[in-house]
Image (spheres, rainbow, N blue to C red):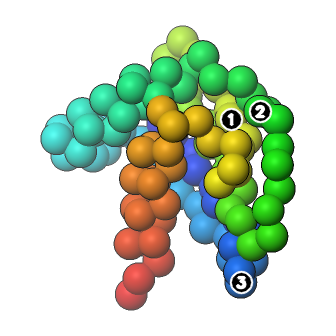
Amino acid sequence: MRIIFERSGGIMGLKSSLTIDLDELPLDQAETLRRIVDEANFFALPENPPTRPIPDGFQYTLTIETDTARHTVRTSDTTASDELRPLLQELSQRARLRRKP
């Protein structure tokens, strides 16, 4: 499984991105991400949910590829489902950690 994550917006309009190949992660980290993806029911989510933009909010583009499927979801702080939020938080944190020197 491969995850391609992009977050943009916020007060400073910063953009962060991250690509993760779960086969390259330690087993425990890969299993955690797979569980979060499954709990989000990611492949059943609509690609572009209705938007309610808010000033300085974040927008997310998340693509997940497996051997048999590829799905992209574009969402924001206001439109992300409760099930999707843990995945967005996990990926946002990983993207922040990657940026630090």
The x and y percentages for residue 99 are 47, 77
At label 1, the amino acid type is Val
The residue depicted at 68 percent of the width and 35 percent of the height is 73
Number of on-image labels: 3
Q: Quadrant of residue 28?
A: top left
In the displayed orientation, state which residue is furthest to the top: 68
The x and y percentages for residue 56 are 75, 72
Residue under label 2, please give it: 49
At label 3, the amino acid type is Met
Whether residues under marks 3 and 1 lie with C-beta atoms below 8 angstroms apart, the answer is no
Q: Which mark is residue 12?
A: 3
Q: Is residue 79 shown left or right of residue 64?
A: right
The residue depicted at 69 percent of the width and 50 percent of the height is 78
Question: Vertical placement of 18 versus 30: above or below?
Answer: below
Real-space Cα separation, disc 3 to disc 2, in angstroms: 24 Å
Whether residues under marks 2 and 1 lie with C-beta atoms below 8 angstroms apart, the answer is yes
Residue situated in front as seen by the camera: 82 or 64: 82
* Residue 19 visible at all: no
Indicate the quadrant containing the C terminus: top left, top right, bottom left or bottom right. bottom left
* Residue 76 visible at all: yes
The x and y percentages for residue 18 are 53, 57
Q: Quadrant of residue 39?
A: top left
In the displayed orientation, state which residue is furthest to the bottom: 101
Q: Which mark is residue 73?
A: 1
The residue depicted at 57 percent of the width and 20 percent of the height is 43
Question: Vertical placement of 43 versus 4: above or below?
Answer: above
Q: Is residue 80 shown left or right of residue 20?
A: right
The x and y percentages for residue 51 are 82, 43
Callout 1: SS? strand
Callout 3: SS? loop
